[in-house]
Amino acid sequence: MTGLPSAAATDRPVRVVVAGLGWAGREIWLPRLAAHPGFTVTAVVDPEPGVRDRARDSYHVPAAYADVDELPVGAADLVVVAVPNHLHAAVAARLLRRGVPVFLEKPVCLTSAESTLLAESERDGGAVLLAGSAARYRADVRALADAAGELGPIRHVDVAWVRARGVPDAGGWFTRRDLSGGGALVDLGWHLLDTVLPMLGPTRITHAVGSVSDDFVNDSAAHAAWRSDADTAGRAAGDVEDTARGFLLTDTGASVTLHACWASHEALDRTTITVHGAAGSATLRCTFGFSPNRDPEPVLTRTRDGETVRLPLPAEPIGTEYARQLDALPGLLADPASRGAAVAEAGRTIDIIERIYHCARPTRPERQHALAGHRDR
């Protein structure tokens, strides 16, 4: 599958394969790709025969395979990889080394070693790695970034995604550290860092510390009824955190507080981002993701000299950011500047996550698995 012309260069839809038909592949990517005029879904990949056959039939996909290694030469211009977390880097690396461009769901990697593997695979195979960054494509986040650009030098950012009840796929791979790499910090925290780090610019994170807790992860009342892949009865207890808090300091003196929480005592699921600049502050209150237990609409405010004003935001349906990212993918796929960009950002993000885990959960080195800093329970 090497040497494929870009779809943008040939003015035809991007031929795309969806690999991994869990919740994200099945509910987010496959239906949007099938409906998008810029893409043609040529195959689906999943090890479960029933799952892949239902997806193939439901969306009239020509082919279905059990493994990405079964994909014929020339079958696709891009493979969307939405497999469980612990397989992200391995599956993407196999495709990249074959010269197959990859769009990889977050988390892009679970360790710094995996980010290095992806960088080497992208370079050796000559194919580009693109990464899921849905939050950046939200209209309200873009408006916040514009407002932050008028606040002078950024001094501090508070960022939080706190769910009332939202432990995903409880008892499944999402709550198993060996398969997920971590809990709320890896899941929600990746989105939060992906939103905040671009606002800070090319600064170096000199310090990253934090704490984690697991008060809700095995509480059935805290599970996300809207976000489950299967019946959770009889599943093993989860061993990841449901809550993580972090503090970051950059080499320019700016700081970040981060709060990622799958479940809490709050009434609504809410995402809050406040940017403090030398010339004022801006706050966005909204709800990332698909939870129905959300704020009714996003609200963006700016505060200067004791006066707070509400800034206008366009209305958009839940999930629009994912469709908007698909709009951008053909151009990113054809742009030579995309090569190496996603993996560099992923390396920066996972370094922060590893350092927070290392601080929060000291561990014996011989017992480390996906992320540095976990301890046995």
Image: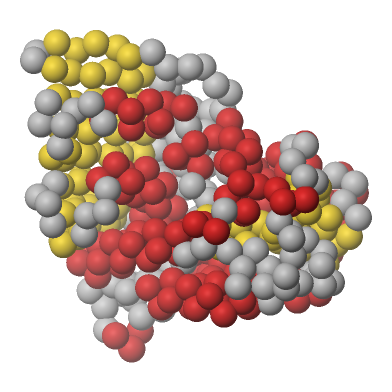
Of 103 and 172, which appears nearest the observer? 103
Is residue 18 something one can see in this rendering?
Answer: no
Q: How many marks?
A: 0
Placement of the N terminus among the 4 image quadrants: bottom right
Q: Position of residue 186 (x, y in %)?
A: 40, 57
Looking at the image, which residue is at 23% across and 74% down? 362
Left or right of 217, for residue 374: left
Looking at the image, which residue is at 84% across and 72% down? 72
Placement of the C terminus among the 4 image quadrants: bottom left
Q: Residue furthest front?
A: 9
Looking at the image, which residue is at 35% across and 84% down? 367
Query: What is the basis of the colouring in this image?
Result: secondary structure
- In this rendering, is residue 342 above or below 60? below
Q: Position of residue 10 (x, y in %)?
A: 77, 50
Of 31 and 203, which appears nearest the observer? 203
Is residue 310 something one can see in this rendering?
Answer: yes
Q: Residue furthest bottom?
A: 366
Looking at the image, which residue is at 16% across and 62% down? 206
Where is residue 285, by image quadrant?
A: top left
- In this rendering, is residue 340 above or below 36? below
Left or right of 288, for residue 331: right
- In this rendering, is residue 22 above or below 33? below
Where is residue 47, by image quadrant?
A: bottom right
Q: Position of residue 214 (x, y in %)?
A: 33, 55
Q: Where is residue 131 in the image (x, y as percent from the top left)?
A: 52, 55
